[in-house]
Image (cartoon, rainbow, N blue to C red):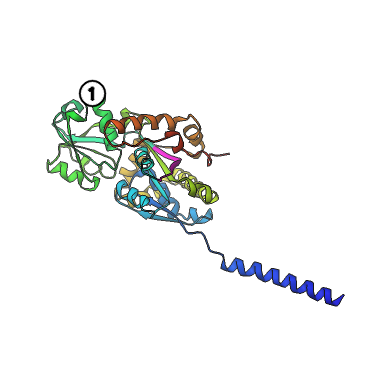
Amino acid sequence: MDVYLSILTKIICCVLFFIFFNSCHSTPQPPLKIALNTWPGYEYLYLAQEKGFFKQAGVNVQLKEFSTLGDAKRAFERGQADILPGTLSELLLLAARPKQDTVAFFITDYSNGGDVIVAHKSISNVNKLKGKKIGVDIGSPGPYLLHRALGMNKLSFKDVAPIHQSLVHMDEELAYRKIEAMASYPPFSTAILKNPDYKIIFSSREIPGEIVDVLMAHRELLKNRRNEIVSLLMAYKKAQEYAKDHPDESYAIMARRENISVEDFKKSVEQDIMMVSYEQQSSYLQNGGTLLKILKGIERVMRETGQLTTPVLIERLIYHDLLPR
């Protein structure tokens, strides 16, 4: 009996040692890296980090900050980030690349006046853009906004002279009259619009709900790290709720990263964009939902402007499996 008891004790000790050894030497998951560019609607991710909401949710998140959406997109393409906040134009461009399986899995906001076409006050309306040089960053919603503005005024890209420029320096180019108008958004459009010589002649408020911002990632990541992604979204939700309850503190934190005043940031998030709540996701992401309809329209415009030449299966670009249950 003592022999059997001794053997059983040794077995139990070995099992406990094995469990303890593996728990001490298991490889932790790497952080979820987010390529974060400057757009007011994405700043709730920054707020979640600054207030410790990611940590509270038990998810390791690393924000990699970039000046423009184009820079953030390139980092995502190179595998330097797991998640890209961006517009549907970026989603379509990524989907057109070979061996890509990038999908949208969450809606952050849609532009409601934030994306703008700014011109010198001598250009009174969109019709006056005919023959004019217009600054457009092809790695932004600018081409889509310009196409819609021109189309609604019976003009086309052939009637103007679009010039590809970085959003970072576009306001300077406009101020020095190297271009005569620009397609931009805050914080890049904020400073020049304080100058009375420049004004908005078209904005996304005239095409409500068409310029949508999403979180996108590779399908495989969303499947393999589902629990972490859900925790990340819960932290993002908490940041939105915190901002509603503590707007002064929250706007100050987010405005600081955008390098704009709290007043300008407040205007952006309360007037120029519409945040989409966690509970509203289903209406966008479900089969046949709002996002699919918007994607089809943007794909058509991007083909007309020559941005998109490769066939894309749009229905596969929307990831439904993280919807609230």
- Write down the region rendered in magenta: 99-109
Residue 129 location (% of width, % of height): 17, 30
Q: From this viewpoint, which residue is outermost toward the top? A: 154
Quarter the C terminus occupies: top right
Q: Mark 1 points at which residue?
A: 153
Q: Which of 262 and 311 is in front in this view?
A: 311
Who's the residue at 45% across and 43% down the image? 244
- What residue is at 45 percent from the left and 34 percent from the top? 315
Type of amino acid at the residue the image marks with label 1: Asn
Q: Is residue 60 above or below residue 105?
A: below
Q: Where is residue 101 in the image (x, y as percent from the top left)?
A: 43, 44
Position of residue 225 relative to residue 141, above or below, is below
User: Considering the image in quadrants, where does the N terminus appear?
Assistant: bottom right
Q: In which quarter of the image is residue 186?
A: top left
Q: Is residue 225 visible?
A: no
Secondary structure mostly seen in magenta is strand
User: Dot 1 lies on which element?
Assistant: loop
Say if 13 sits above or below 165 in the image.
Answer: below
Q: Write the residue at 40% across / 54% down.
A: 63
Between 162 and 120, the residue placed more toward the observer is 162
